[in-house]
């Protein structure tokens, strides 16, 4: 028996290496990394948690998912595909006001997303 340890970043994998003909039982495992590909930011706070943080720290200020998404995009936080897109490419969307952007940025920093 031989063990192999592989370290990448902060992820460590331990595998048992053996010849197939010596193994009496084996399990084939297929892992599609596309399904598990989360950025560190995506695994942090939800939109609801961000809205709640802003409301608590900014005297009940309400922010929409659109504004949160705009701020996240501005700071390079990758979003998943949105299936509720506008039908035309030139559709108008309201831009996030400066005071709400600052509140969202503070929330993202508090959750260590930026």
Image (cartoon, grey):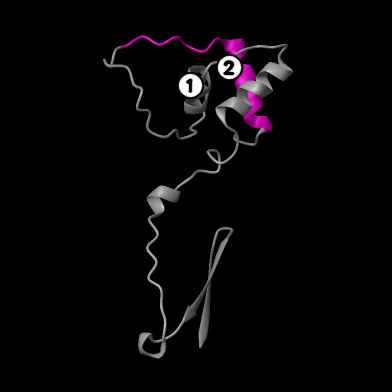
- Mark carried by residue 70: 1
**Which residue of the protein is positioned furthest toward the left in this rendering?**
88
Say which quadrant the C terminus sits in.
top right
Please state the horizontal and vertical placement of residue 51, each as a whole percent of the image: 61, 21
Please state the horizontal and vertical placement of residue 82, each as a whole percent of the image: 38, 28
Judged left or right of residue 8, residue 52 is right
Relative vertical location of residue 42 with respect to residue 74 in this rendering, above or below: below
Q: Nearer the viewer, residue 21 or 100?
A: 21
- Mark carried by residue 101: 2
Q: Are marks 2 and 1 in contact (CB under 8 Å)?
A: yes
Magenta residues, start to end: 91-110
Magenta stretch, main secondary structure class? helix
Secondary structure of the residue carrying tag 1 is helix
Tell me how far mark 2 sits from mark 1, CA to CA.
Answer: 9 Å
Dot 2 or dot 1: first in sequence order is 1
Relative vertical location of residue 41 with respect to residue 55 in this rendering, above or below: below
Binning the other alpha carbons within 10 Å of mark 1 as few (below 14), some (14 to 19) or many (20 upward) gives: some
Please state the horizontal and vertical placement of residue 73, each as a whole percent of the image: 47, 27
Binning the other alpha carbons within 10 Å of mark 2 as few (below 14), some (14 to 19) or many (20 upward) gives: some
Name the residue at 34% across, 21% down: 85
Q: Is residue 103 magenta?
A: yes
Name the residue at 63% across, 28% down: 49
Judged left or right of residue 40, residue 25 is left
Q: Nearer the viewer, residue 75 or 110?
A: 110
């Amino acid at each position: 028996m031989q063990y192999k340890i592989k370290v990448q970043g902060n992820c460590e994998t331990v595998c048992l290496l053996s010849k197939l003909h010596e193994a009496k039982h084996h399990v084939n495992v297929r892992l599609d990394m596309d399904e598990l590909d989360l950025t560190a930011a995506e695994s942090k706070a939800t939109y609801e948690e961000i809205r709640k943080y802003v409301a608590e720290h900014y005297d009940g200020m309400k922010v929409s998912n659109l504004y949160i998404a705009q701020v996240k995009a501005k700071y390079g936080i990758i979003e998943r595909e949105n299936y509720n897109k506008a039908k035309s490419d030139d559709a108008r969307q309201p831009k996030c006001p400066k005071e709400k952007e600052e509140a969202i940025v503070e929330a993202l920093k508090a959750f260590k997303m930026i």
